[in-house]
Each structure stands twice: as C-alpha cells, then as structure tokens.
Amino acid sequence: MAYTSVTTVLNRLTKKGWLVCDKQERSFSWKPLLSKAEASALQAYEQLNQFLAVGNPDIVAAFADSLDQASVEQLEAIAQRLQAIRKAREAQ
C-alpha cells in the first residue's frame, strides 16, 4: 500500500472521530479514541439501526422467528438489561 493511501484513510478516520492524530514536527502518530469493545458496540448499534430501518415488521418478525434458543435467550437478557437501565435513569 502506498503511504498516501494509508494516510488518507487515517485522516478520514480522524475526521470521523475514531482516531486522534499527534503531530510532532514531521512525524505523525494515530491513536484510537475508542476501545475495541466500544467500537464493536457502536458497529453493532449502527447495524441494528440499519436493519430496523427496513421498517417492515413482517421482515423483522420473520428474522426473529428464525433465531435459535440461545439467540432468543440473549435477546431476553438484553431486554432485561435495557429495562434496568431505563428504570435507573428514571430514578435519577
């Protein structure tokens, strides 16, 4: 890969808020602003929003119906966690 191509990608990620660039004289270094877990959570959030943007409840229901038991249990755990977060937020 060419240096300029890599630099272009790093600069774009910096503008999007994923990286921070530290320039010292003629030297550049980039560091992530998010941890790997935070980046994964953000990516999952964006993918879920794209999926739900389909807007057709039949498609979402068909997908949910095709999940195996382990996935259903994960979704139930997520729903319980969301309820706890919302109750804690309301209590503040």
Image (cartoon, rainbow, N blue to C red):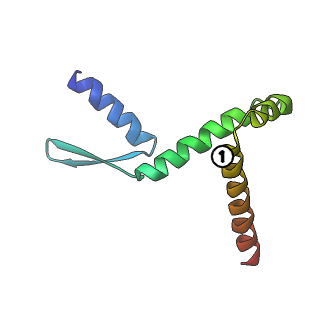
- The image quadrant where one finds the N terminus is top left
- The image quadrant where one finds the C terminus is bottom right
Residue that protrudes farthest toward the bottom in the picture: 92
Look at 29% across and 24% down and name the residue there: 5
Location of residue 7 in the rendering, given as x and y in whole percent from the top left corner = 28, 31
Classify mark 1: residues with Cα within 10 Å, few (<14), some (14-19) or many (20+): few
The number of numbered badges drawn on the structure is: 1
Lateral position of residue 90 relative to residue 38, left or right: right
Location of residue 70 in the rendering, given as x and y in whole percent from the top left corner = 65, 46
Residue 15 drawn above or below residue 41: above
Which secondary structure, mark 1?
Answer: helix
Circle 1 is placed at which residue position? 70
Which quadrant would residue 88 be assigned to in this image? bottom right
Location of residue 29 in the rendering, given as x and y in whole percent from the top left corner = 23, 45
Q: Nearer the viewer, residue 57 or 67?
A: 67
Location of residue 44 in the rendering, given as x and y in whole percent from the top left corner = 57, 42
Residue that protrudes farthest toward the top in the picture: 1
Look at 35% across and 30% down and name the residue there: 9
Residue that protrudes farthest toward the left in the picture: 26
Lateral position of residue 2 relative to residue 38, left or right: left
Amino acid type for the residue under numbered disc 1: Ala
Q: Which of 69 and 32 is in front in this view?
A: 69
Lateral position of residue 59 relative to residue 69, left or right: right
Which quadrant would residue 91 be assigned to in this image? bottom right
